[in-house]
Amino acid sequence: MASRTEVRISGFGGQGIVLAGVILARAGAIYNEIEATQTNSHGAESRGGACVSDVVLSPERIDYPMCLQPDVLVCMSPESATRYVPLIKDDGLLVVDEDLVPEVPAGKYGRVIKIPATRVADDEMKRRVVANVVMLGALVGIDPLVSEASLEKAVLDSVPAGTRDLNMEALRRGFALGRAAADSLG
């Protein structure tokens, strides 16, 4: 891991964007024993408004908790892609939900990976509500920002007891999607 890695997860309210950021930060801080911060912002609407969750991970002390220029950008809505792609680092990783962001804006990112997170959650698992966890698993399958084991523990700590099995299945499907996408890039 670089000395500081900035991750921005973006979409709209109701997709679990903030929870995804909280889980990633928890995995880093508690189970990978690295420094982590998580901040978020969202529109006044409870569902449908813009939503962003910033996570900073570092093996060293974090002196500023916000993303200045994301190394990794996850977009789960076309509006978030349009708004945040211009901010990504030149060699950054852009991960989009391929069904919700059908046209990826031009940008200076190094790699773009399309993941069918919502389709897997909705069509295969019959529970769209876990698309955020599918995407989070895919992200770590692509780029091991934290270990898969630490992310599993953080998910179990963060979701209601009655949804743990569902969320673990979503996470494992995401890991597989991410690893397959990373392998296809070489």
Image (cartoon, rainbow, N blue to C red):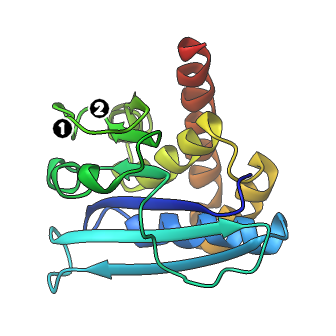
Q: Is residue 119 above or below residue 53?
A: above
Query: Can you see residue 172?
Result: no
Q: Front-most of 29 and 71?
A: 71
Q: Could you tell whether 13 is left or right of 175 in the image? A: left
Q: Position of residue 47 (x, y in %)?
A: 19, 73
- Element under disc 2: loop
Q: Residue at x 72, y 65 (%)?
A: 27
What residue type is disc 1 on?
Pro
Q: Residue at x 54, y 82 (%)?
A: 65
Q: Front-most of 44 and 56?
A: 56
Q: Quadrant of the image for the C terminus?
A: top right
Q: Residue at x 15, y 71 (%)?
A: 49
Q: What is the spatial separation of the Cα atoms under label 2 and label 1, in whole angstroms?
A: 13 Å
Mark 1, other Cα within 10 Å: few <14 / some 14–19 / many ≥20: some
Q: Is residue 123 above or below residue 63?
A: above
> What residue sits right under mark 2 in the picture?
98
Q: Front-most of 71 and 17?
A: 71
Q: Position of residue 94 (x, y in %)?
A: 40, 41
Q: Position of residue 146 (x, y in %)?
A: 73, 54
Q: Front-most of 13 and 36?
A: 36
- Element under disc 1: loop
Q: Could you tell whether 132 is left or right of 28 in the image? A: left
Say whether disc 2 or disc 1 marks the residue closer to the N-terminus: 2
> What residue sits right under mark 1 in the picture?
105
Q: Is residue 120 above or below residue 70?
A: above
What residue type is disc 2 on?
Glu
| Callout count | 2
